Amino acid sequence: MAMKSVWRAGLAAGALAAAVGTAGADPADARRVRIDIAAKAAPQALNELGRAMGLAVVFRENRPITASTKPVKGEMTAREALGRMLSGTGYAYRFVNEGTVSIFNPAADAAPVALEETVELPPLSVAGEGETATGPVNGFVAKRSATASKTDAALIETPQSISVIPRDQMDAQGATTVGEALRYTAGVVAGTAGLQSRRFDPVFLRGFGGFSADASYASYHDGLRWNFPARTAVQIDPFLLERVEVFRGPSSVLYGRAQPGGFVNLVSKRPTDTPVNEVFARVGEHAYLETGVDVGGKVDDAGTLTYRMIALGRLAETQIDYQKDQRILLAPSFTWRPDDQTTLTVQAAYQHDPHTSDAGFVSPRGTILGVPGHGKLSNSFFQGDKNWNRFDRTEAWVSAQFEHEFNDSLTFRSNARYGKIKDTFKSVDFFQLADDNKTLYRTPTISKHDVDNFAIDNQLETKFETGPFSHTTLVGLDYQWMDGPWDYGWSSIDPIDIFDPNNNMSFVKPKPIVRNTNEIEQVGVYAQDQIAFDKWRLWLSGRRDWSNIHTKQTIIATDFVRSDIRAKDAAWTGRAGLVYLFDNGLSPYVSYSTSFEPTLATASDQGPYKPTTGNQWEAGFKYQPTGYNAFITVAAFDIHKENVVSSALVGTDTVYRVDGEVRSRGFEVEGKASLAEGLNLTASYAYTDMKVLETSESTTLKDDDVISHKGKRPVAVPEHTATIWADYAFQPSNALNGLTVGGGVRYISSTFGTASNVWNEPGYIRKPSKVPGFTLVDAAVTYDFGKRNPRLDGFSVTVNAKNLFDKDYIAACNGFGSCTFGEGRMVLATARYRW
């Protein structure tokens, strides 16, 4: 109820006023949208147009507007639509920034701006080019996205739940990883791997995720999936990104193989006609040093060729003893527009992480569970060897996005990327804590990957009308390929005393013993129709996939093949969704969607396995309130995942069966607002009821009792999560002009640390394996020096504090007997100059 009260207070703070912009292009001329709005009362028609165009509409009249608008139908810009709609009404409009249009009576205005039909409008000074599905967002509130549709679609008209974390929000909250950018998003749990979450970006979406080979990562990049085998993952630095978008629920109908909980799509910064010039330097705790540059703009005066160059370097220690966080990044891109109908964008990147952090893996004993006679482990605990543990990764990719508009109704797009991940991971892994509560047995390992990725997606979009129905159809053909050899080896090392660890022992350094070859191919054909009829929006989609997976395990020394499994699968998936657009900005919706994901078989002669399948019912509403730059989503969902591979011990043999089923149901609330007078708000709540409905798996306790996993809650899935963030920029009328203060609170409820939901630890056998929940506080302060001194325009300093009160907590336990500490307090100061 507290968050609800905060939201009501925030939304009641006042009507959205004009935000002062800087030089740029007029948003009214940036994008053409197909609209069909009948003649009706002006407030209703204008609000409907605002939703279609992604604009906030503000009415400046003190008296009710009783005029009726003219009907508007066809594909046009916002300026063209407004001109036709208001013709003859006596009212005019003015764009006050790239996302807001003001409606007023010119006769009563001291500085009137008339309609285009009678008087030419003066030039406007606004920032950016207006919101598109992949472009910048002013503030925290996005109105459009392509992630759910692969078209430029309004979020208010999309019958599934989507969250967009824009660049402004990432900067305000000081996100240095994608996982950090996701922390204030409903239904998303990030950071469960502790400090290892700085190396990858593991996520749980609506409860679906996991650890090790079962983990899910933020691995969709500009609408194309990165594929990789176990014990590695791609990580995209957030400095490269314009947006981070979360799509909830099954997505196979457009993207092929996927988890039913959803995915995270990372949207890159792109070249722009408007000059982009930014440099920053960042310092902080744990000897954190980082600097970056982002520059771009036109190469020629006509803007036929534009460019962008992003670079970043980082040197840092971490809270875990002997672990570092290092990165070098270079990412050039350019866009070529030979004519008004054709665009080609080519992007490339090289990212090298010479030494990234490993997590401090700990036992529940000595952390969550008390150990009489022993102290509590510090969150800097390191189970490894300071001269061996190291993760060295190189990522490189080149991508191309091509678009050609044949006419107003027919557009072809092609999106392709080739990428490579190469890494070496040396570790001394947690194995088991002895019954004396202090002796930790460990295993030295080495893991090497050399992964090649290729993906291409070709699309043909058409727009047409059949009687009263307007259609936006999309047909596509996509292809994904991954070849990822993974070499793995191990040796032995003496145990350590966890309360007096020796992290510098002599041991036989492991060499690769086993080679796992993983190759994935997928071809998909899909079709989608977005149908508009009056205030109804109907989405219908279907897809056919063909996948080919080959896994092979070989003993390197003898070239002996332990297993060689090939699996060919085909599947139909689909989606149907319905939305109704009320005039007051409320849009209830309902949808049904399905998913499939082939199982990447491992070293077993019992495969191949049937693909897992998923289905979801989702219903809710979205609300884009009139007069406020705000967006609220409420969603309820019910997801079933079937054909989950489970294992059971039969005699002395492990038998794998495709008999598992998992259900996740719950609801989410998320709201964002960038209100007048410099106030940004974001708040979320999620309730997730997740249960294993069917499985063969069980745990044999140390007292020989057997506990089935059926009916249990999966590990690391909280029942409740809640967040709220607000920041406020003092205005010119205030003596503190230039100062922005902000802060947030994140809450994650308790989770289970074992699949049996009970401990199997000495002294705690059969007791609930609860990992305590935690509440963390973040804060931010920014000072914009240009507000006080024009000669310092563009220069600002920001201080971000994450986990402000330095709370010790366990992020999660992984079900394999070990847990990870969450990140302690991290204070970073960033000096930034933009011009």
Image (cartoon, helix red, strand yellow):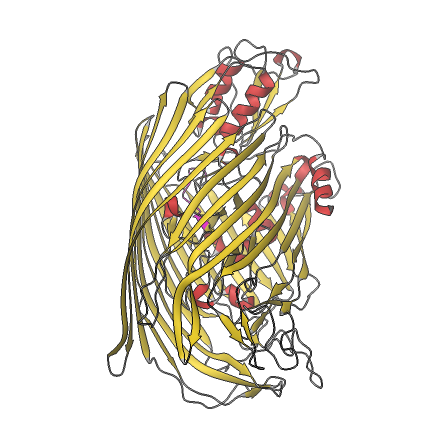
User: Between 90 and 210, which is closer to the camera in this rendering?
Assistant: 210
Judging depth in this view, the residue of 464 and 735 nearest the camera is: 464
Q: Position of residue 350 (x, y in %)?
A: 37, 59
- The answer to whether residue 727 is above or below residue 689 is above
In the displayed structure, 461 sits above or below 444; it is above
**Identity of the residue furthest to the top in this view:** 88
Residue at horizontal 61 percent and vertical 44 percent from the top: 669
Magenta region: 265-275
Q: Position of residue 551 (x, y in %)?
A: 29, 67
Number of residue marks: 0
Which residue reaches farthest right? Answer: 735
Q: Would residue 37 be found to the left or right of residue 557 on screen?
A: right
The main secondary structure of the magenta stretch is loop
Q: Nearer the viewer, residue 768 or 160?
A: 768
Please indicate, yes or no, whether residue 102 appears anywhere in the rendered image: yes
Q: Residue furthest left?
A: 559
Residue 273 colored in magenta in the image = yes
Confirm whether the magenta stretch covers residue 221: no
Image x and y of residue 514, in percent: 32, 78
Q: Is residue 130 visible?
A: no
Question: In the depicted view, which residue is nearer to us: 696 or 501?
Answer: 696
Residue pictured at 53% horizontal, 54% vertical? 280
Quadrant of the rendering where the N terminus is positioned: top right
Q: Position of residue 142 (x, y in %)?
A: 53, 39
Q: Is residue 645 above or below residue 278?
A: below
